[in-house]
Image (spheres, helix red, strand yellow):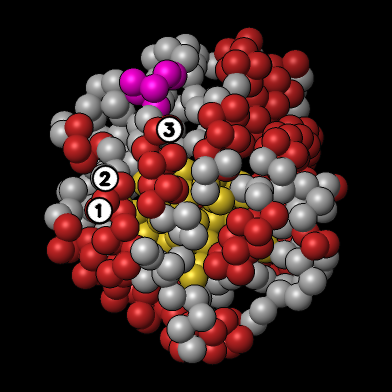
Amino acid sequence: MARITLRQLLDHAAEHEYGVPAFNINNMEQALAIMDAASSVDAPVIIQASRGARSYANDIMLKHMMDAVTEIYPQIPVCVHLDHGNGPDTCMTAIQAGFTSVMMDGSLKADGKTPADWDYNVGVTKTVTNMAHLGGISVEGELGVLGSLETGMGDKEDGHGAEGKLSHDQLLTNPDEAVKFVKETGVDALAIAMGTSHGAYKFTRKPDGDILAMNVIEEIHRKLPSTHLVMHGSSSVPQDLQEIINANGGKMKPTWGVPVSEIQRGIKHGVRKINIDTDNRMAMTGQIRKVLNDNPEEFDPRKYLKPAMEAMARLCKQRLQEFNTAGQASKIRKVLTTAEMAKRYAKGELDPKVA
């Protein structure tokens, strides 16, 4: 196998009715944990890097890590995705670094914190789509601004996210506008706003329909049955991981994430990509804290990073099984090259199907 584009992978996911977790990475340990999990259950996977991760690890290092994992696990189709690109330049440099998919988040302006208007979002997203599709690269767009329906505030993580108070309309993607957005931009996948947010502190209570609007997903899917939907900020923030961290010197406040059952509900209604970062951070941090708490004399990083990798791999494997991604890798008979995908775009085979 080889690197796969997001479009080919999500088309396969739609055909076989599964979702694909998109795991964020910053380092080698995370990349290996994700691939170990994917290999253990025969699952395709999306590995994504944010602008913050690219700054932390450097594009050259990320490129060689991606080359390495596809060589170590040749049987696993891997989509390498840019998370929350803030402009055409950011997306282009990611493509040059070997990413097979980019997100143009035009819901915010280039500063990554100021909510953008409709014309800006459509214009910048269409620019990136036209550019990327020439090379067969997939594009994810976003309509609506990620933030909390409980507080009305935008979310900020890794230097990205709306600042200040947002209106209810901004926090919920309008289904009719979603149809128009997909038609005008030609995106391959659409991230929508429905109450999820980045980081660990998503909800102060177990979420219900008032603060996690899954009905928005269902309505958009009814209007856009062929469009692949994306849930951002979809870590579940497991209670057991919170307890491990706090039992070993951590001070995480009580919090709730997105229940797996709600994600599974979304998968039944067109959600094909599910972004997960916080859960993996918690899994690793809990084990690092535990090893150092139990063995304060320890100073060999391998002694705490190996258990951390194993904990992250267990969580990734669990999500791959819960989203029905497990067992799907071997069903992808041929990974199309970006050149082959470019020809499909040029022929109009991949144009959005909008009634």
Q: Position of residue 152 (x, y in %)?
A: 22, 27
Check disc 1 and give the amino acid type.
Glu
Q: Is residue 156 magenta?
A: no
**Magenta region's main secondary structure?**
loop
Q: Which residues are magenta?
A: 207-212
- Which is more toward the observer, 32 or 343? 343
Element type at mark 2: loop
Which residue appears at 14% of the width and 55% of the height? 117
| Residue 128 seen by the camera | yes
Question: Mark 2 highlights which residue?
Answer: 174
Left or right: 285, with 251 as reference point: right
Q: Quadrant of the C terminus?
A: bottom left
Contact (CB < 8 A) between labels 1 and 3? no
Check disc 3 and give the amino acid type.
Met
Element type at mark 1: helix
Q: How many marks?
A: 3
The image quarter containing residue 336 is: bottom right
> Between marks 1 and 3, how big is the CA–CA gap?
17 Å
> Between marks 2 and 1, how big is the CA–CA gap?
5 Å
Which residue appears at 25% of the width and 22% of the height? 151
Tell me if mark 1 has few (under 14), some (14-19) or many (20+) residues whose alpha carbon lies within 10 angstroms of its own: some
Q: Position of residue 311 (x, y in %)?
A: 74, 32
Question: Mark 3 highlights which residue?
Answer: 214
103 up-or-down from 263: above or below: below
- Which is more toward the observer, 326 or 303? 326
Mark closer to the chain start, 3 or 2 = 2
